[in-house]
Amino acid sequence: MSDDSSDPPPPQAKTCTAYIDVENKSSHLFKFQVLHQYTGDDVDDSGWHLMKPNEKKYVMKVNYRVGIFTTGTDNWKVHGKKVVEKTENGEKKLVDGEDWRSGTGVAVDWKKHTLRSEDNEATTTIKVFETEVQFDSPSGVSTTSFYRHDDK
């Protein structure tokens, strides 16, 4: 009988952290909200951030797990409100306009973009273009559509 006590234990799940930036690659003033959920965990909510065209901003930190026995996935939603200038009583104001969102418009509409060990302590940038959202992490890039909410 062999003694297995010298074998290393199997790798355990490790909790990792990623820093999330949003970059407004559209030509419009927007407010953006990012939602992230690692399977089985609570939803992380960035809150709303007003962003000019070509502006990039840190919006949140998220936790996720890696390891041989982890089965979770990172799920994402990006919501947008196009901000427009309106004149009331001779005064110019910025007001929320059209609602925009990422995804396909079906079911719960979460975009899967799995964070990996090489994304730990690194920045994932979510780039919002006119018609698509790009998730850019050290481990890879994925995209989904971005559309006006009342279009679907």
Image: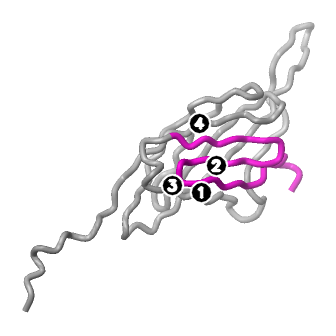
For the residue pair 22 and 1, the one nearer the viewer reads as: 1
Where residue 27 appears, x then y in whole percent? 84, 31
- Residue sitting at x 83%, y 42%: 130
Mark 4–mark 2 distance (CA, rounded to whole Å): 10 Å
Please, what is the three-letter code of the amino acid marked with disc 4?
Asp
Q: Which residue is mark 2?
A: 135
Q: Which residue is mark 4?
A: 21
The quadrant of the image that shows the C terminus is bottom right
Please, what is the three-letter code of the amino acid marked with disc 1?
His
The reply to whether callout 2 and callout 1 are in contact (CB within 8 Å) is: yes
Left or right? Give the position of 83 relative to 47. Answer: right
The reply to whether callout 1 and callout 3 are in contact (CB within 8 Å) is: yes
Where residue 65 appears, x then y in whole percent? 41, 57
Magenta span of residues:
123-152
Secondary structure beneath dot 4 equals strand
Q: Which residue is mark 3?
A: 115
Residue 149, magenta (yes or no): yes
Q: Residues within 10 Å of mark 4 (few under 14, many from 20)?
A: some
- Residue sitting at x 40%, y 60%: 66
Residue 66, magenta (yes or no): no
Left or right? Give the position of 131 relative to 18. Answer: right
